[in-house]
Amino acid sequence: MELTAGHVWVMVAAALVLFMTPGLAFFYGGMTRAKAALNMMMMSFISIGIVGVVWVLWGASMSSGEGFMQMVGNPFATFGLEGITDPDGLIMVGYGATFAIITVALISGAIADRAKFGAWSLFVPVWVTLVYAPLAYMVWGGGLFSAEGAIGQALGPAIDFAGGTVVHINAGVAALVLVFIIGNRRGFGKDPNHRPHNVPFVMLGAAILWFGWFGFNGGLAATAEQGGLIWVNTLAAPAAAMLGWLITERIRDGHPTSLGAASGVVAGLVAITPACANVSPVGALGLGLVAGVASALAVGLKFRFGFDDSLDVVGVHLVSGIIGTVALGFIALPTDGVGGGLFYGGGPAQLWAQLAAAGIAIAYSAVLTAIIGLAIHKTMGFRVSQEQEAVGVDLSLHAETAYEFGVGGHGGSFQPLHEIVTGKSSEEAKESATASGKESVQA
């Protein structure tokens, strides 16, 4: 089979989606404290390595093909991609892998500054296997929510073109569950040092995410007309969401912020993801505006309710993911002149399908993530010791720091910043934090 323009586009789109995870690393890394920036970025990068292996070995097989009770594919059907030789199949495996990678990486932002890297590295493959791959099968692989599935036949297939339920609601729920399992950072809500340390990194990360999202949403466009609609909607919704977030900040706080602009863009991207091929450009503007305002308001709820969603994964991805998914019941365009959302006279069927998909995705992700998270937390422990957290997870877990700013001394000597802050050399701080970590594990 010859390589066609369609094959090339999907490969380019997959590369764009893969590039989004390093973009997420910058986005999250800039939002953390300086002494946790590298660890935060490493949680995204290790997700690429682990999920890339898992997806080739059994993840791709679990997300497609013959399924078990319409919930998950057979992991051994094409284990190691055995038997998949055609370019269509291989290209789709690669494209699917990039979605699995960024979905699990999104979760890490909720547990910044305090999670063990080893525990996270175990959580990633288990969660992708037991939570992400089955949900991807249910929605995209011919499972429960597809046109052939039991729920799809009863209510009509749920619309999730690029991942409202599979990616954003799934990751947002998992993030919330892990926050309650691991607990809040020391000084949460009181320590001013929990503010982002590098907002330009955050804005760079948001720009990379927006750039890659055109491949995320448009990779599987079936026609040129659909591709054009997806492109415009992926521009319109984040633009409106950014404005909605900034207006909300201006009214509530008295000033718009660059962090708010970056977060608003991401909220709009999340909201348009499931709807990108099924709403009009005006609908995308309205959807983005609502998502930007709602997520801007939602991120403050963590202080009211006392849960430390460090980098606002719940407020942005869960809230805007639900908005984008459910909104299709109202603003989905008719297909071939039939159906569509309530605003197009399509009746309530699509709304019920969207609500069912969102509700089951929330329940499934919450229960399975709780089982996985608690199992890890009760065995190897998911959280670093208090001293490791105080020293910083970059130094205590990775023996390195993102920055080596210092003060010149006698003879032009140089003293790194972490030595000035902690009063200990790198080696002393590492040994102390490591010893503390061993003691907490033994306890």
Image (cartoon, helix red, strand yellow):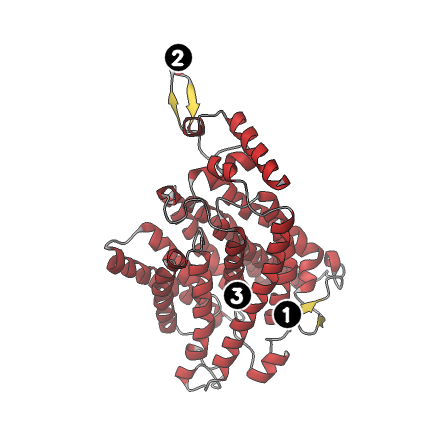
Q: Position of residue 288 (x, y in %)?
A: 37, 66
Quarter of the image with the N terminus is bottom right
Q: Are marks 3 and 1 in contact (CB under 8 Å)?
A: no
Query: What amino acid type is highlighted by mark number 3?
Result: Gly
Instruction: Examine the rendering and report whether any part of residue 393 can be seen.
Output: no
Q: Please identify the quarter of the rendering in which residue 145 is found.
A: bottom right
Which of discs 1 and 2 lies nearer the camera? The answer is 2
Residue 141 bears which disc, if any? 1
* Residue marked by disc 3: 163
Q: Position of residue 352 (x, y in %)?
A: 50, 81
Q: Residue 267 appears in which quarter of the rendering?
A: bottom left
Expressed as whole percent of the image width and height from the top left, the position of residue 312 reads 43, 55
Packing grade of label 3 (10 A; few <14, some 14-19, many >=20) is: many
* Residue at image point 42% right, 79% down: 330
The residues tagged by marks 3 and 2 sit, at their Cα atoms, a distance apart of: 58 Å
Camera-side residue of 91 and 252: 252
Label 1's element?
loop
Q: Amino acid at mark 2?
A: Gly
Disc with the residue nearer the chain's start (1 vs 2) = 1
The residue under label 2 is 411
Residue 28 or 219: which is nearer the viewer? 28
Cβ–Cβ under 8 Å for marks 3 and 2:
no
- Tell me the element at label 2: helix
Q: Amino acid at mark 1?
A: Gly
User: Could you say where residue 318 lies in the image, as x and y percent from the top left?
Assistant: 47, 63
Outermost residue to the top: 411
